[in-house]
Amino acid sequence: MAGRALAGLATANGRMEVQRIDIATKLAGRVAEIRVKEGDFVERNTLVARLDSAELLAQLAAAEALVQRAVASIGRAEAEIAVRQAEHNLSEIEMHRASELEQRAAGTKAELERRTAQHLVWQSALPEQI
């Protein structure tokens, strides 16, 4: 068959040029699937490959776990502030009660001073914003 063309086909000498297009991804990773073969025609925006997302999903899970830990820490801190606020409020009540008792001679000045000092300690334990 060399030298003779098949019916319906033409032969010619010449040079053929192909336009080559490079493909890049936004993120580096392993290719999980290639959906085209060499020589296939593809249209713009056609999915040609799929990256393995296992590593990205693991990073997402780790980030979500960090968020959950941060939220839990905030909850613990808020609970601690509430406890300190309650202790401060109680010390204020006890200080006023000791003051009233001392004024009526039913309590001692030492007890009033102790309650006042305790109130100042609890007050200093509170965050500045409260």
Image: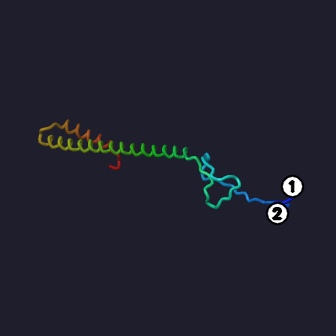
**Figure check: 52 above or below 20:** above
Alpha-carbon distance for marks 2 and 1?
13 Å
- Estimate the x, y position of residue 126 in percent, counting from the top left: 32, 44
- Estimate the x, y position of residue 20 in percent, counting from the top left: 73, 57
Question: In the image, what residue occupies the spot 23% across and 37% down?
Answer: 114
Question: In the image, what residue occupies the spot 19% across and 36% down?
Answer: 111
Dot 1 falls on a residue whose secondary structure is loop
Task: Say which quarter of the image contains residue 78.
Answer: top left
Q: Which quarter of the image is occupied by the N terminus? A: bottom right
| Kind of residue indicated by mark 1 | Ala
**Figure check: 48 above or below 108:** below
Marks 2,1: beta carbons within 8 A: no
Query: Mark 1 Cα within 10 Å, few/some/many (few <14, many 20+)?
Result: few
Mark found first going from the N terminus, 2 or 1:
1
- Estimate the x, y position of residue 66 in percent, counting from the top left: 46, 44
Q: Could you say which is closer to the camera, residue 42 or residue 22?
A: 42
Question: In the image, what residue occupies the spot 35% across and 48% down?
Answer: 128
Q: Could you say which is closer to the camera, residue 109 or residue 44?
A: 44
Give the farthest residue toward the right: 3
Total tally of numbered discs in the picture: 2
- Estimate the x, y position of residue 75 in percent, counting from the top left: 36, 45
Task: Tell me the number on the disc at residue 127.
Answer: none
Q: How is the image coloured?
A: rainbow
| Kind of residue indicated by mark 2 | Ala
The answer to whether residue 41 is left or right of residue 113 is right
Instruction: Please name the residue that numbered disc 1 is placed on.
Output: 2
Dot 2 falls on a residue whose secondary structure is loop
Query: Mark 2 Cα within 10 Å, few/some/many (few <14, many 20+)?
Result: few
Q: Could you say which is closer to the camera, residue 11 or residue 22?
A: 11
Question: In the image, what residue occupies the spot 70% across and 52% down?
Answer: 38
Instruction: Please name the residue that numbered disc 2 is placed on.
Output: 10
